[in-house]
Image (spheres, rainbow, N blue to C red):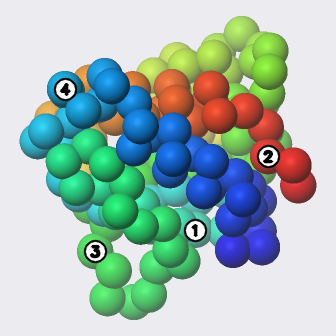
Amino acid sequence: MSEYPGGAWFARYRERVNGDAELKVIGDWFTTTFALTFGDARYAVRVERGAIVDIVAPKLDTRMPFGFRAPVSVWRKFLSADPPPLFHDFFAMLMRVPEFVLEGDSLIAMQNARALHRMMNIMRETGAPNV
């Protein structure tokens, strides 16, 4: 994982998600694999009961029912210490930032909206990658 945001950042993110007390309560039914696409780099985030079990570059047979795609410039704003307006929350980005796209089955994403929202907030709280 040498692409943005990098392996060290993903390790910190995974550790924070898996140690989050709120996700331990609300993530019980959140089991899926979703995609995160940072520019040209795509990752599969495998989640079981609200905990990240793996983050990998997907293969052809990796099923990802939904995902989030944006240019690296958008992700950099979202992950910055002081995000500009509309980049502070992934729901705001979905509504107002055309380059931030929910791909795939939005129903599955929204059925897990509370846990997914917490997971994306933890992503922002993890901070900017050192890349």
Residue 128 lies left or right of residue 36; in this view the side is: right
Identify residue for label 3. Answer: 63
* Tag 4: amino acid: Val
Please say if 6 is above or below 124.
below
Identify residue for label 2. Answer: 129
Identify residue for label 4. Answer: 25
* Tag 3: amino acid: Arg
- Residue 42 bears which disc, if any? 1
* Tag 1: amino acid: Arg
Marks 4 & 3, CB-CB < 8 Å contact? no
Residue 2 vs residue 42, the one in the foreground:
2
Q: CA distance from mark 3 to mark 1?
A: 13 Å
Q: Residue at x 24, y 32 (%)?
A: 24
User: Mark 2: which secondary structure?
Assistant: loop
- Viewer can see residue 1: yes
Residue 102 vs residue 25, the one in the foreground:
25
Dot in front, 4 or 2 = 4
Image position, residue 37 (x, y; %): 58, 59
Q: Dot 2 surroundings within 10 Å: few (below 14), some, or many (20 or more)?
A: some
User: Mark 1: which secondary structure?
Assistant: strand
Mark earlier in primary sequence (4, 2):
4
Q: CA distance from mark 1 to mark 4?
A: 29 Å
